[in-house]
Amino acid sequence: MKILLVNEKTKGSMMHNLYIDANNIKKILIFENFSRDCHENLTNPEDTYFSLTDFYKIKRIIDFQSDDLFKRIINSFCPNVYGHEIVKAGILLAVFGGINNGVINVLIVGDPGTDKTELLDAASKIAPHTVFTPIAQANSSSLMPLLHYDKRSGDLILEAGSFIMSNTGICRIDDFEKINQPNALAEAISRQTISICKAGVTCSLTARTSIIASANPIGGHYNKTKLLSENLKIGNDLLSNFDLIFLLLDIPDEEMDHYLSERVMTVHSGVYPEDKLDKSQRYVPSTSDTNRNHLIGIMPLSKRLKVSTEDKNINVLPISLLQKYIAYARKYVHPRLSQEARKMIKIFFGNMGHKYQFVDGTPITIRQLETMIRLSQARARMELRDVVISEDVEDVAEIMEFCLFRIQKDEFGNIRTKAKAKTVVRSGKQADVKRFLSELQRFGNVKGSHVFNIQEMQQIATDSNVRYDNFQSFIDLLNDQSLILKKGPGTFQLRL
């Protein structure tokens, strides 16, 4: 094939006229990311080619699986990021997807340096069909279709945005809070269609797209005294379209710091997990795997999914094999709900409606019920099962409660519910904390430093009429919630 002629493009136009002379045209089905430089992988899962070797490898995963294949897949995803097992599980559920319009949207909100970008990068690599909108272009015009006239030909041109390009796949968006006019995305996210009515053109385009997005709080740090919508400056009508919203905070955790330091040291010593990426895919069940059904309901999901550096029984899947596994599951596995799963979904949905009646006005509706069904289907699909069992629903319910509890927790660790709203206001604790922090910031601005000793802080609290039972306990509570940071003995810094 050769190009006979290329006309010069008109200034301001994005198009060239190509004249091509071809003897033969053949469609080749490929799976690899053929356009990683453009941050796109436009391979349709339905067109993915599977060789006999691929089927053999997938069969070996199933044949040698233990009762905890879920744990193995979770720890094969983004192994360079230690921890965040529940967040990884939620992202993978979105990548596997539900059945019959089973779009799953995930939003990750967190402080800078909490591995949000690494998790999204890993999701882009393993998903069969991904479109990545660069941060500089993350606005409504790059996400939505654009209809305009070509300056050279005068014809109407429809440029597909990221939503259309990622139809039946994943649309990754970084810095979701910076998108201009977020309400323009409401139809595309909630209805999975995009309507165009311009220049005499009226049409509706399908956008069955799962969104995996990340967002940073306004000001660079998540303020627990504010609601999620206030931290992001995004309305609840748009946030409610996300099935899972994960909140990642940089909170001092001695146990996590210990595990993380061990993880970093073992990775640099070449022990785990990089040395296992190219080894045999045989999976050896650990002693705890045979007791999975017993552990469900007793041990939290985050504990069951965690792998310590001493665990030698889990061999992570290479990225190429995980890609094939996901594409195979999306193409051939279509789970249906069992009677036990239906009963469990009804029970968990009913309990959720009574437990989480949020003070910000966000109700538990049928949308959460549909979310639980889609997530349960994706959970069964991860293990290539044709039936959704009750254990799938239990895992999904724990993931959903993990999200709801995190985003609705205030600075005291309590859930902001309608039942507790009056108690919080009556006790005055929340108002006292806000007034105390505001006075600390004001005094810090005056003296040019936001570092205070315990005597200065107590004097400020007294002058501000802040009520407390024990001042040291009051300061320890603020320190535990990362509202103030301990700089030394009896010295604290206000975290702005």
Image: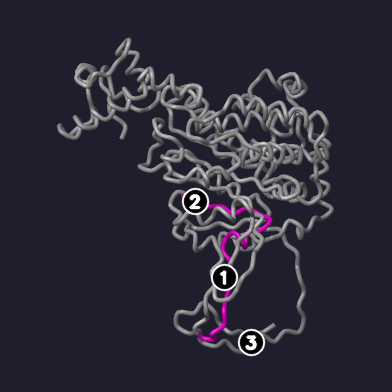
Is residue 302 visible to us here? yes
State the separation of the CA atoms marked 2 and 1: 21 Å
Q: Residue furthest left?
A: 447
Using the image, determine if residue 468 lies above or below residue 320: above
Q: Nearer the viewer, residue 297 or 40?
A: 297
Report the quarter where the N terminus lies: bottom right
Q: Residue at x 72, y 47 (%)?
A: 326
Q: Position of residue 97 (x, y in %)?
A: 70, 46
Mark before the other along the chain sequence, 3 or 1: 3
Magenta segment includes 110:
no
Is residue 307 visible to us here? no
Mark 1 residue type: Glu
Badge 1 element = strand
Q: Residue at x 35, y 17 (%)?
A: 476
Residue range (magenta): 152-175
Q: Position of residue 193 (x, y in %)?
A: 63, 58
Q: Residues within 10 Å of mark 3 (few under 14, many from 20)?
A: few
User: Which numbered dot is residue 174?
Assistant: 2
Q: Which residue is mark 3?
A: 19
Q: Residue furthest top?
A: 469
User: Which numbered dot is residue 159?
Assistant: 1
Q: Is residue 166 left or right of residue 281?
A: left
In contact (CB < 8 Å): disc 3 and disc 1: no
Q: Position of residue 286 (x, y in %)?
A: 73, 24
Q: Residues within 10 Å of mark 1 (few under 14, many from 20)?
A: some
In contact (CB < 8 Å): disc 2 and disc 1: no
Q: Quadrant of residue 343?
A: top right
